[in-house]
Each structure stands twice: as C-alpha cells, then as structure tokens.
Image (cartoon, rainbow, N blue to C red):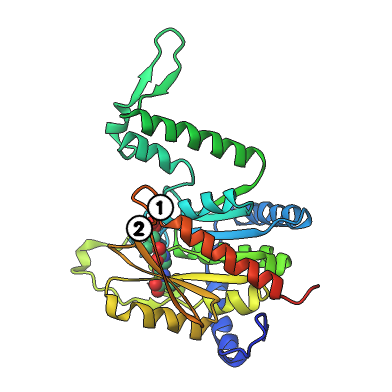
Amino acid sequence: MAETDGSAPRVSAAEVQAQAEILQKYLDATEAPADLDDDRVRVSAFVAKHHNEGRKIAVVTSGGTAVNLEKRAVRFIDNFSTGRRGAATVEHLLERGYAVVMLSRQGSAAPFARTLQDATSTAFDSKFMDCLVVDEATGAVRIECKADTAAASLVQAIREHQSFTKNGMLLHISFKYLSDYMLKLRMCGECAAPAGPSAIFILAAAVSDFHIPPDQMAEHKIQSRSGPLSLDLSQVPKALGVLRFHWAPHSFFVSFKLETDHDILISKAQQSIEKYDMHMVVANELLSRYKRISLVTRAGETIVTKRSEEEEVEIPMVEALCAAHAQFCSDAPKA
Ligand code: 9Z3
C-alpha cells in the first residue's frame, strides 16, 4: 500500500483491494458518458503541461450527483448541492497560482460566473431577462445590475475569468449522473497521478450513497399502472479509498463531510480519516456551511469562520488547505 506521510497506514491493503474489486465491477457495468475519452485527453495534457512548468495542480469536485432510476432516464434522485463552495474554492486556488481541473455538476455554480447571479440577485430565469438591456442601434446586449457595487464585482469577475481561462489555468469538465461522476473521478485520478505530491484533490461534490446497480435498472420508463413505486436502493461502491491508494497514491486528499446533526459531524469526519486515510476532512453542517467549517486531521479539529461579513469562508479555508498541501509537498520524499 502507498505510504505518503511517513506514518503507518491505518487501512489494510486487503480492505482497499476488496473495495477496488467491487468498484471495478460497477465501473465495468456502467455505460461511459460520450465525452469521457475527450475529457481524458484534455485532463492528461493539462496536468502534463502544468506539472512540467512546476505548478501545483488541484482537482476540485463540486455539485450533487443525480441517480437515475431507469437506463433511459426519465426520473432521478438528486443530492443537494448548489456548487457554490466548489466554485469559490476554484477561484481562490487560481489566485494562489494553482492550475485547476474542476469536475462539476452540469448547471451548478461556476467559478466567476456565480458573481452574475449575485450581481443580478436572481437565477437565470425570466427575472434575469429584466436585467438585460438591448441597444437598439447595434443589437448589443448589456446587463444592468441593481447596484454599482454589484456591477463592479461583476466586471472584476469577468476580467478574472477571462484572464485565467486565456492563460489556460482552469480546465472545466462536467457530470450529471453518479455513474458519469465515478468514471470521470477515476479518469482525473489516473491523469493527475503523475503529478504525485504536487496534486491536491478537493472533493466537495455531494455524492449519493445509494443507487440502483446497472444490472438491476429498468431499461425503459417505469410505468405508473404497476401501482405504487417502492425503491430498494443499494449502497454505492466506496471510491475514496480506491482513489487515495490505487488511482493517485502520492497525492494530497481533502474530502468533505456534510451532516445536518451537529452531534455526529466530527466523529463522522474522523471516520473518513480512519477509513480512507484522507489527509484532511472539511466538516460542515447544512445550514451554517457558509459561516463555519471544521478542518479535521489526525492531529485534531480547527474551526474556521468568516473573518468579516464580506469575506467568504472559502478564503481562510483555501489558505489552510494550501498551507497543509505545501507542508505535505516539502515532507514528501524527493523523486
Ligand atoms: C460538502 O459538504 C459541501 O461543503 C456542500 C457545499 C455540498 C455542503 P454548496 O454546494 O454546499 O455550496 O451548496 N460536500 C460533500 C458532501 C458529501 O456528500 N460528502 C460525503 C458524505 O458526507 C462524503 S464524499 O458522506
């Protein structure tokens, strides 16, 4: 088993091997999304370029996975996540010089673009149309924000977005279903593995614990004439340990733990460290997640809060993750 932090591994190799076999069976039975091969080419070239140029690489997952009930999916069960934490995290990593691969749920909040929603105080629905002004002479469309400060932050966000994307520092790929997420997570793990300790995985996506296995899923739309629908969902194969030990064994791992019950949050985060040997777990409660988080490591718990009303909690969070990653890189055996 891979050893990266100089201490004895807490998870047995046999346990991870058993998880890897179950996961492999699931991935083999899963239909690959049409863009998987293209994404692999893009991610692998992105990692090679930035690693050769001496940059640190971050893989950030964001948004919730959908679990389809039919193969030709008409219905699905969703995991809650707006994607805002992942999007904010990506922005602050870019500011700190990281090259970032973002794997996010289609349609969830995107880095910099989220500012458009803030500036117009609306989602992209019909109210958003009220903010658009057409110049009759040229046909050009302008967005009119509610306040000057909102307009200023939008202009800044557009500039930052364009400068980071022009410089090729951000690669954005997407998923909708759990199965797409799992296949693309493996692909990202394999592609980022050559960067070794210089790669950090920040796993903020809200991933379903339950699904219908591919071999038990109806092909066509489930018919209502068959009466009430009872669902018997199976546990999703565990991927964290396999990612950590098999796909990218020398990299730095941060996973997230979301609970609604305060009393079990920290112990569940500690379990992720024990079970999957995560280097750090960000523990958060649903309702307070933008105000307060806990960073849990083997050494203990550090509470991180917003430092001012205006500052988002992801700024001190990313500072702490980058500091821990820098320490990990300097402790890692030199190649
Ligand atoms: C998180 O805990 C994220 O912080 C949130 C962010 C999803 C709460 P938003 O996207 O919210 O800004 O609306 N993500 C991980 C959630 C998760 O499903 N973790 C699994 C678990 O808790 C472990 S992989 O069991």
Query: Closest to the observer: 333 or 117?
Result: 333
Residue at horizontal 42 percent and vertical 48 percent from the top:
109
Query: Closest to the observer: 231 or 183?
Result: 183
Looking at the image, is 119 positioned above or below residue 19? above
Q: Mark 2 points at which residue?
A: 290
Residue 280 position, x and y percent, is 51, 74
Q: Earlier in the sequence, mark 2 or mark 1?
A: 2
Looking at the image, is 268 positioned above or below residue 314? below
Query: Closest to the observer: 261 or 213?
Result: 261
Residue 191 position, x and y percent, is 68, 63
As measured in the structure, the alpha-carbon distance from the residue carrying label 2 to the one carrying label 1 is 7 Å
Q: In which quarter of the image is the N terminus?
A: bottom right
- What's the amino acid at mark 1? Glu
Drawn side of residue 279 relative to residue 258, left or right: right
Whether the residue under disc 2 has CB within 8 Å of ligand 1: yes
Q: Name the residue under label 1.
A: 312
Residue at horizontal 52 percent and vertical 64 percent from the top:
320
